[in-house]
Amino acid sequence: MELQNREEIKNDILQSWLRVAWVYPMDGPDGRVYLRLTPGGRLKLRKRIKELEAETGESGADLARQEEAGTLPLDRKKMELSMMVQAYSSERKFIESQGQALGRAGVDYEAPEPRSE
């Protein structure tokens, strides 16, 4: 079955991450459920980011910026790479905000600041 819709593709990617135990659900302080990367998931994600960057010839950080801007093409590999970079970067920021020290980042991506209008 070919997935055509952006949300279907994203959900399929997240389901595959759950099946291989790269992420686990966690209740947030606001009553919402968030997906957190497992320690092994972070390492596997980091490796897979490099593999997908080589396959697509694209920078994961550039694709993540395109996703934020809403200009990312409907291509599963590029969408997955973008999601991986965003997940990896946000997980590192969360861990560091808790006062834990991490080594050098495998991906350098800064999410844009939310616009206030």
Image (cartoon, helix red, strand yellow):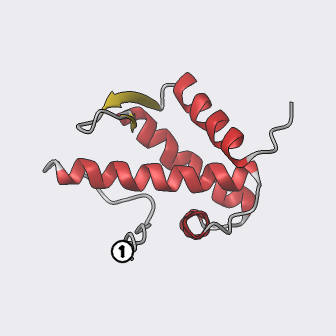
Instruction: Give the total of numbered labels.
Output: 1
Label 1: how many residues lie within 10 Å, few (<14), some (14-19) or many (20+)?
few
Please tell me which residue is depicted at 33% across the width and 29% down the height of the picture: 26
Question: What amino acid is found at the position of numbered circle 1 in the picture?
Answer: Ser
Residue projecting furthest to the bottom: 117
Q: Position of residue 23 (x, y in %)?
A: 45, 32
Query: Which image quarter is the N terminus in?
Result: top right
Report the front residue among 22 and 79: 79
Would residue 19 be found to the left or right of residue 114 on screen?
right
Q: Position of residue 38 (x, y in %)?
A: 38, 33
Residue projecting furthest to the top: 19
For numbered disc 1, what is the local secondary structure? loop
Please tell me which residue is depicted at 59% across the width and 29% down the height of the picture: 15
Query: Which image quarter is the C terminus in?
Result: bottom left
Q: Is residue 69 above or below residue 87?
A: below
Q: Position of residue 104 (x, y in %)?
A: 32, 60
Please tell me which residue is depicted at 36% across the width and 74% down the height of the picture: 116
Residue projecting furthest to the front: 117
Q: Which residue is mark 1?
A: 116
Q: Is residue 70 above or below residue 3?
A: below
Residue projecting furthest to the left: 99
Q: Is residue 35 above or below residue 111?
A: above
Report the front residue among 23 and 30: 30
Q: Position of residue 103 (x, y in %)?
A: 28, 55
